[in-house]
Image (tube, coloured by chain):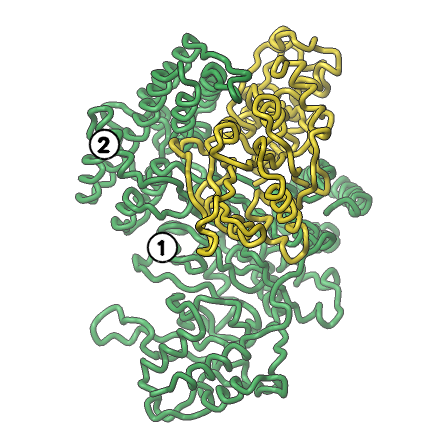
Chain colours: A green, B yellow
Amino acid sequence: MSWVRCLLVAVTVVSLPLAGLAHIVVEAPWHPLAHAYRSAVFLINLRPTDWGLVERAFTAGDAPGAVGRPAREQLIELDAATGSAHWPAIEQAIAAQDRDALFAAATRAVSQAIRHHLGEAAEHLREPGAASRELDEARALYRSLADFIQEADPTGFHDVGLAWLELASSIGHAGVVAVGAKPADEVAFAAARAAIGSYLIANYEPDALADRTRYAPIPEQQFQANPEREVTAWLPPGSDLNDQDPLPRLVLNFEEGGIDERDLFLVAFGDMLFDSPEIFGEPARSLGLACSTCHNRSDINQRLFIPGITPRPGVIDVDGSFFNARFNDHRDDPVDIPSLRGIRFTAPYGRDGRFASLRDFTRNVIVNEFAGPEPGPLVLDALVTYMLEFDFLPAPYLNFDGTLNELAPPAARRGEALFQRPFPQMGNRSCASCHLPDSHFTDNRVHNIGSAEDGYDAGLSGAYDTPTLLGTNYTAPYFHDGSLDTLADVVAWFDQRFALGLSDDDRADLTAYLEVVGTGDQPYEAFDGEHTPFRLMVDELSVFLSTLDTLIPARDQAAADLVLRTVAADMAADASAMTNRAALEKTHELADLLWQLRDMIAAAEWDEAERLWLAYQGLEQQYDPELR
Amino acid sequence: MNPLLNRRAFAWLGAVLLLIPAVAPAALAQQEPLRIAFIPQENPEKLLGDIEVITDYLSGEIGVPVEGFVTLDHAAAVEALRGGGADISFSGALPYVLAHDQVGAEVLLSEVYRGRPYYVARIFVRKGSGIDELPDLEGKTIAFADPISESGYLYPLETIADAGLIERGDDPQRFFKRVYFAGGYQQAIQAVANGLVDAAGVSEFADLLLSPEQQRQVKWIAESEPIPAHAVIARKDLDPSLKQKFVDAMLKLNEPENRWLLQHVYAPDGYVKATHDAYEPVAIVARRYGLLS
């Protein structure tokens, strides 16, 4: 698994790894105008485009990941200060739902805002504190363009980067209580400012931008030289692909039975695939998305968030235009990420139960939802075999048949009776008619309970799969679309929808019952000084690599390559989560050795590959005590 | 984010001398408040939320209202101590010794990271650049964080001087092709990772500000003597009993039931009592470079 699926953003802030906390990569807060610009450009690439969201990108003051007053206010101030009309142009483009006009106006506005703040810095060079603030603001705005310049125009990026360094060096310093004060070098500052200004004018403020169908702030000169250029996948500000914290505990059936995963080739290979972006296509692959990104440790990821694609954390529309334009259903139909615990008992699959087979469902995720290549039989067999090992959390208040045991509190017992009581308003059925206690609290069918509006008059398309109630204390929000926050909300919804006439006490008892049924032993991974997130990753990657003991002798080039690409990339990325920073280079050395092994296998140099594989195992054993 | 990583992050907020009075218990409202200056880092809005949590805690422990506010930078915090706008401030080691010298500030506590109340500065370079030891830096370019920075300038410079490559007090540009002040640790280490400069002299934690992929591309070739960690300092003449109560309350953050609160004050592992002696080495270095007489 990857604890540090890094958002490929220009700047990240990395929290120091602290014992007991999963390591995370946190995006540094954005300047509001840079945030609005990147968000809007991302959103206009989506089909259909949510123009309400585009407008909010400029006008809202509560955007995740942004700090400061809304972009609209800043643009109005910029217009007043410079005599320009950026905000009216942007506002007009949004009203007209004109993507080209919006891209042109917003790009020009950001570029001019950078130049404006550099101009203000130059004006205040005799006041180093004031000049520094303007420079910082210009630099924070430049961040919205920098990674695209770096990718498309490395030479330009280098030259402009040196100019920014020159600005910071020549701006002077106010000192601390006047100690160490240093005057600005106005000549050097002016030259560097001019270099940045001319680059911005040439590339972001031309009289007219070339036509395009996909939008990204690539320098215009580079875009015109190569309009077909593919841009590395990127996400808007505020996106969060980190694993949730606390991290769910994974319960695997074989492991509870004392069987070593290394002895289960297909399971170990499936475990690796579950954590591999390599089975998906673009953009998921470049973004580092894997099955485990949404299903942390077989459960869910309550923090997963991509503005425009996830209406709220943990809820995602996987059949829009972003991940696979061919699979775009042009519907706003996000689904709450389901837990995969106990998945062998919870067929059918998909929130509306459209797949009877887990294998068919898995193929659909790979090929259609995330644009991956057609998976071979080994890939599907392994993924399914692995997932079939996912067990529910042990349930401390339940007997084997789903009835409450003697540990359950009285309120839950009263709730159990209500849960079993047939209601005429529900066709003389009870809650337990669908959530069968002795069948993992599901009947493995779909029902239309009126929880969603049909897409058209008299339609009957709103039926959804009966979810299990096991482990649900840890899987909020609820319902197929994640529209309800708590289990009490779910009880209240049923009470109202079916006019059950429950009293306050009844609702409290039923909620208490759901909470008791939804309780699991040790729902989260418990980390400490020894069992760190990085250590957990090292152990997992070691299991993944154990499949090479089968694949190298079998000369299975494709499967071995997949293992090595996945593990080497994960190991290098996760190294930043090490608490023992002194051993960082050793982790990099191991990752590099895996890349070499991959090269040997790609060249079908099997003897050398076997030698390297042995060398790797020796080195891993040697370094193991330091890998934490 | 570790404050040892931070300099003047997010100063684009511009006018952020964010005077945010913390919520004080009503019964304490009539008393003179204890005013604490926080140095901005990471997300200033988050810091404001943090301040409320920690000032509420301190109010309860000390028995007087506690107000917190975020200053623009270290210099502004020292100015606030001098002008009476702040009674207590979080501070880097160098700003503290300057404040001690100029306005009589007193150090009360040191932060502890990874079990120690000190850290080091390092010289980072790109792997495969052919720069493997300090003498290789001759005629190369280097980025420091800021001219008034212990780990982002003075200590890396000391390390180079200790190696006999520059004379203390001499212009380092005689050894390097060019010296830049990038404006912060992040900008300096990014300049190395992006190939803009050959080296950076910054805090040992600065590479954590790079993406995992960039972290693979850099290495460090030398590290400084230990630098006393960031401190909590008081203005001259602060009431001794109030000072003692504040220190006691802060040290209680080390206790298991209070450790969660550390997340709201720059997330150190804890605090230890500190005296000026621990910071004297920084003063010595500052004198060598003319920042103290």
The x, y position of residue B200, in whole percent, is 61, 23
Marks 2 and 1 belong to one chain: yes
The x, y position of residue B212, in whole percent, is 59, 39
The x, y position of residue B45, in whole percent, is 44, 43
Crowd rating for badge 2 (residues with CA inside 10 Å; few <14, some 14–19, many 20+): many
Output the chain of dot 2. A
**Cα–Cα span, label 2 and label 1:** 31 Å
Asked if residue A14 shows in the view, the reply is yes
The x, y position of residue A407, in whole percent, is 63, 84
Q: Is residue B117 above or below residue B121?
A: below
**Which residue matches tag 2?**
A86
Q: Amino acid at mark 2?
A: His
Q: Amino acid at mark 1?
A: Gly
- A289 or A598, which lies in front? A289
Element under disc 1? loop
Asked if residue A560 shows in the view, the reply is no
Output the chain of dot 1. A
Tally of marks: 2
Of callouts 2 and 1, which one flags the residue occurring earlier in the amino acid sequence?
A: 2
Q: Is residue A65 left or right of residue A600?
A: left
Crowd rating for badge 1 (residues with CA inside 10 Å; few <14, some 14–19, many 20+): many
Q: Is residue B162 above or below residue B43?
A: above
Q: Is residue B65 above or below residue B290?
A: below
Residue placed at 63% from the left, 23% from the top? B201
Residue placed at 43% from the left, 64% from the top? A336
**Which one is closest to the eye, mark 2 or mark 1?**
2
- A64 or A411, which lies in front? A411
Q: Is residue A49 above or below residue A445?
A: above
**Which residue matches tag 1?**
A320
